[in-house]
Structure formats: C-alpha cells, structure tokens
Amino acid sequence: NISSVASREGVATYVIGGFVRDFLLDRGKPVDIDIVVVGSGIDIAKKVAASLPGKPEVNVFKNFGTAMIKHKNLELEFVGARKESYHHDSRKPVVENGTLEDDQKRRDFTINALALSLNETDYGTLLDPFNGISDLDNKIIRTPLEPGITYSDDPLRMMRAIRFATQLRFEIHRESLEAISAHKERINIISKERIVEELHKILLSPEPSIGFSLLHQTGLLHIILPELTALQGIEEIEGQKHKDNFWHTLEVVDNIAKATDDLWLRWAALLHDIGKAPTKRFDKKIGWTFHAHEFVGAKMVYKLFKRMRLPLNEKMKFVQKMVLMSSRPVVLSQENVTDSAIRRLVFDAGDHVDDLMTLCEADITTKNPKKQKRYKNN
Ligand code: CTP
C-alpha cells in the first residue's frame, strides 16, 4: 500500500530505525514502524490511510512534521526526510528538508540508521551508508557522526546508548564511551521523565548491572542518582572493613531480575541499601554499623521519586516498604536464594502487589512470635 501510494505520488519512502534493527536481530513483534518520506510525511500518511480498509484516522503532529496511523495493532509513523542542526542549550533542532542520507546521519546509532526501501524499483533494498550491518554483526553501539556531535545534539542518546548496550548485550564503541564521559553534564538539559524512561528499560533488561556499571563508569550515575554512587567504596578502620554496597546492590538487582519481571521490585532492589551511605558509622565496640538505614532509606525513596518525577502513588509506597524490609532483596543475593517462600513472594509480586504490601506491613509491625516465625519460614 505505502509503496504504491508513494510511487503514484512520485516520492521515495523507506522503513527506518528500530523496526529494521529488530527485524534483522529477530527481536519479537514490532509495535511501531517509522517511515521516512523524501517529501511530505503528512501528505503520504493521509493518502495511505485513505487507501487502507476502514480508512483509519491520521494523527497529525504539525510541529514535528509527522503523522501517525494505527493499523492492525501497529503504529505507522510517517516523517519527511530531514536535516537537523542543534543549538547548544536545547534538544529542539532546527529542521530543514533533506535527503534519505541526511536523515540517516541525524540518527543516534548506526544500527538505528538502517533503511529498507519501499520503492517499487528497488523494493526491499537495504541502505546502510554508516556500516550499521557490520555493527549489528559485531554487536557494537556506534554513532553515525563523530560521537561528540551526536551526543551533544541530543544528550538523551547517552542514556539510549547505555540502554541498548544493556538490552542487546552490545558494546559501546570506545570513542563513544569517552564522548559520553566528556559530555555527561549535558544530561541536565534532558527532562526527568525521559531519563526515568531509560532507567526503567535498563532495569527491565535481563542483566541490569550492565547498564548501571556503564552509567557509573561514564559518570552519568553520579549526576542522576547520586544516592547510589554514594554507596561505592570500602572503608577500613582498625582492620575492619565493610562491603562495597554499590557493587553489592548491582548483584542484588541482577538476582532479583532472574526471579521477577516486576519493575517496582527491581527498583526496590536497586534502592534497598541507599540509607547505608548517610547512616554509616564506625563503633569501637561493634565495628561498622548502618543503624536505622532502612528508615532513612525509605525516606530517601520518597525524595528520590519526587526529584525524578516518578509517581508518588502506591508504587512508591511499595518500593518504600520493600526498602524498609530491605532484608528481602538482600536475601536473594545470598546463598539461600532457593528459599522457596521468598522466591514465591517475588514471583507473585507482579500479580499480588497488594498482598505483598500487606505481608510487608505485617512483617514490620507484628509482635506476634507465631506470625514472625511464619513470615520467616513460610
Ligand atoms: N532516534 C534518534 N535519537 C533519539 C531517539 C530516536 O536518532 N534520541 C531515532 C533512531 O533512529 C530510532 C528511531 O528514531 O531508531 C525511533 O526511536 P524510538 O522509537 O525511540 O526507538 P527505537 O529505536 O524504535 O527503539 P525502542 O522502541 O526500543 O525504544
């Protein structure tokens, strides 16, 4: 349909971005397909919609020059090929019409700049001016332009690089990683909502520690979640050391990721020890203590959620409760990870958040020794 409409109108169209990448990686069903039109994306979208059965509605975003059609559980996003230039203090580019290659050049990574032709003369041809295929094969995240330009143009891409590296288990090209470290402060022009969206995706990956160590290594983590980097390091007084609570946290997060897909349990695991940095103290008699770190940590969760514009609703309360009983995620990192009760608790968490919250509450407040025993053993 797109092909015949476009050829009738005499404009070239291409599928580009995530769809092509995921198709070549054989990565599940697509939800959205980006289509670049060398001409007006909005006009072609309207004509394509008119030619489809049921004539679906076209959502036009005039300011962005894009148009979207919902068709068979798919979102088709049409955009005119464009050339972009950026001002230093904004994510909003100055946009001009451009060629397909201009459009590929303005994209974040070579693996996201691959285009498939929809034109009748060369239908299905892959257009890959920046060696995206070779980067897909070698599992490399690389920018089409000099990385300093790509990241400075849109600093959210620093988070995206780390997110794709975590989701796909790809490596970030060395120069790219250096550019992220060099431009890390630019993350401050990005909205908290977008940063959190990337953090969610990193947390929902099979091995979230890949992303958090990259965030740490590049210095981004210190800017966005300083509560976590404050946990890093080991101190020694009178021959007594405590563990490095940052690396321990990453281990816990990976363990919990094996047990549950619940995003909020994963957040709870990430934050379960944040009260330890401000409460750390060396006591001559008992050594290192983190007295009441659970309570301090639960308060910190509230502040962190507020700062990151995360919803201050029952999900936040859930994370706070899990932090208050921070032994739960910790237990998962230890040898008794097979403890069936804890496993069940965690597995069920997605479906039974309310039950789990009641359990958490009971666990914290109950003075009944029978009940205490049950929560420990059952
Ligand atoms: N893109 C970009 N810079 C960004 C965001 C997006 O260059 N900051 C481009 C990339 O070519 C990307 C495409 O726009 O492939 C679509 O972006 P998006 O839908 O956010 O991501 P996907 O690549 O589709 O991946 P995912 O759906 O996993 O987020």
Image (cartoon, rainbow, N blue to C red):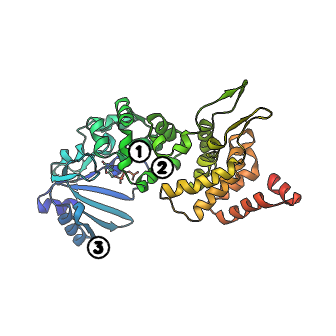
For the question of whether residue 327 can be seen, the reply is yes
Q: Residue at x 30, y 36 (%)?
A: 147
Q: CA distance from mark 1 to mark 3?
A: 33 Å
Which element is circle 2 on?
Answer: helix
Residue matched to label 3: 57
Q: Quadrant of residue 262?
A: bottom right
Pointer 2 with pointer 1, Cβ within 8 A:
yes
Question: Horizontal placement of 225 versus 293: left or right?
Answer: left
Identify the image quadrant of residue 251. Answer: top right
- How many marks the image carries: the answer is 3
Mark 2–mark 1 distance (CA, rounded to whole Å): 8 Å
Residue that numbered label 1 is attached to: 159
Comes first in the chain, label 2 or label 1: 1
Give amino acid for label 3. Answer: Glu
Q: Position of residue 118 (x, y in %)?
A: 22, 54
Q: Could you tell whether 140 is left or right of 39 in the image?
A: right
The x, y position of residue 212, in whole percent, is 51, 40
Which kind of residue does numbered mark 1 sit on? Met
Q: Say which mark, if any, is on residue 324.
A: none
Q: Which residue is mark 2?
A: 199
Q: Hey, what amino acid is under mark 2?
A: Leu
Label 2 or label 3, whichever lies nearer to me, is 2
